Amino acid sequence: MDGDTAIEPQLDSFSLTFPLPYRVAFIIILAVWGWGLNLHFLHIRRIDVPSLIRYPGRSNANQLPHHHSTYRLATFLSATSSLSIVIFWLFSRRDPQRVIDYDWIPMTNLLVLAGLFAIPLRSLSVSHSGRGRLLRALRRISIGGLAEAKDGKFGDILLADVLTSYAKVFADLFVCVCMFLTRNGSATDRPDRGCGGAIMIPLIMAIPSAIRLRQCLIEYVRVRQSPYKESVGWGGQHLANAAKYSTAFPVIVLGALLRNLSGEDRVAATGLYRGWVAACLLNSLYSFYWDVAKDWDLTLFSESRERESPDHPFGLRRRLLVHKPGVYYVVIALDLVLRCTWMLKLNTRLDRITDFEGSIFLIQFLEVFRRWVWIFFRVETEWVRSSSAGLGGDDILMNDFQGNKYEDED
């Protein structure tokens, strides 16, 4: 399984140059750059993301656009980490013992990054309000909370969905801290993904999906209590969405059991492996269907009459704001492929490759990349729903919205 000691018993070349703490920092900073690019491109496409997530608009023309502020924060974070890793390279010189001994340098970098996010000082003058709102949203959704539509419900859901793609990154962050605090341990040594016991890593990886599951249940309860049931439906779509997130738990649990199973019990290992494959298949295909049919409101999985309607390209919808139809087809295929990267483990030779630290990092990066692409089309869909309903982005998110009969743009 991940990081098998039989594959890399010592520090590999990749880890000597790019230790685990820096890989975690890199992917976290990548999220900031990615969000800036999301905002920038969608702004060019005249999709007002701040209004959808209920973020205050700019009060005057002299203020920087939202994406510029995000770029500035990303640049600041990147500069901090770049300086740290250069200092680390100068001290360690890729010597295995020095890399282990100087683990305090990358851990200090993680601490600085955490401080920059957790303490949005006005004197820093780098996206103060944005970081403050991010912290408030994180506190709200940390237990699966969900704001009302007027307070930024869509932003909460978008953030929680992003966290599900960072589940393995959060697990690696815990591994870094655990190894650093363990006696005779080092955060830059070969990653011990069993650090903290057999329960902690699976639990951390399950938290983001649990957050989204609870949000879906909150949505369901709100619909059931709504005085407008006839227009919003009975809430079945929220239960179906909750079921989608629940499919992540068998994958995590069965994977953990396989990692901790004695190699001598082949019968149990075979049964668990088959169960893990089935769970992964269900989770991947269900999530892919939901991405296409529900999150993006495309008609690929609709009835043939709607899928082949002359009003829109095959399998898509009438209003396409992000790009040309061909891009949508590419993104659909890409989403399916990246949802199924776990299938590499079904091949004996490729399974060994996925146990290298460089491969683990690449898979984490690809999942973050998939989510970044997903955001463009998810936000576009919400904008189309809002403008089509004439509600200006009010509470139509994730209701039993049916069909794709959008009005033409003015």
Image (cartoon, rainbow, N blue to C red):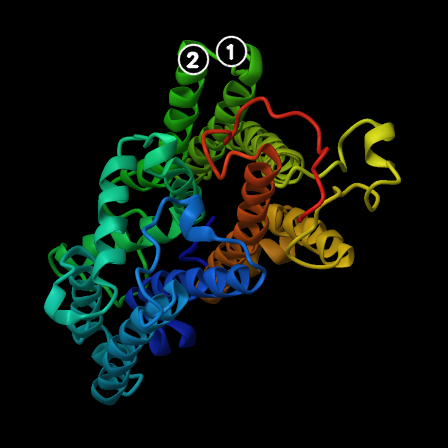
Amino acid tagged 2? Ser
Using a 10 Å C-alpha cutoff, classify the residue at mark 2 as few (fewer than 14 neighbours), some (14 to 19) or many (20 or more).
some
Percent position of residue 41, x then y: 54, 64
Image quadrant assignment for residue 146: top left
Helix, strand or loop at mark 1: helix
**Residue under the point 48% across and 24% down:** 242
Nearest the viewer among 56 and 31 is 56
> Where 148 falls versus 87 (above or below)?
above
Horizontal side of 184 relative to 153 (left or right) equals left
| Residue 226 disc label | 2
Using a 10 Å C-alpha cutoff, classify the residue at mark 1 as few (fewer than 14 neighbours), some (14 to 19) or many (20 or more).
few
Percent position of residue 42, x then y: 53, 59
Percent position of residue 91, x then y: 20, 86
Q: CA distance from mark 2 to mark 1?
A: 6 Å
Helix, strand or loop at mark 2: loop
* Circles 2, 1 touching at the beta carbon (< 8 Å): yes
Percent position of residue 79, x then y: 28, 79
| Residue 124 disc label | none
> Where 278 falls versus 90 (above or below)?
above
Image quadrant assignment for residue 308: top right
Amino acid tagged 1? Lys
| Residue 229 disc label | 1
Horizontal side of 124 relative to 266 (left or right) equals left
Does the image show residue 10? no
**Residue under the point 55% across and 33% down:** 276
Horizontal side of 122 relative to 308 (left or right) equals left
Horizontal side of 265 relative to 144 (left or right) equals right
Image quadrant assignment for residue 302: top right
**Residue under the point 57% across and 33% down:** 283
Does the image show residue 123? yes
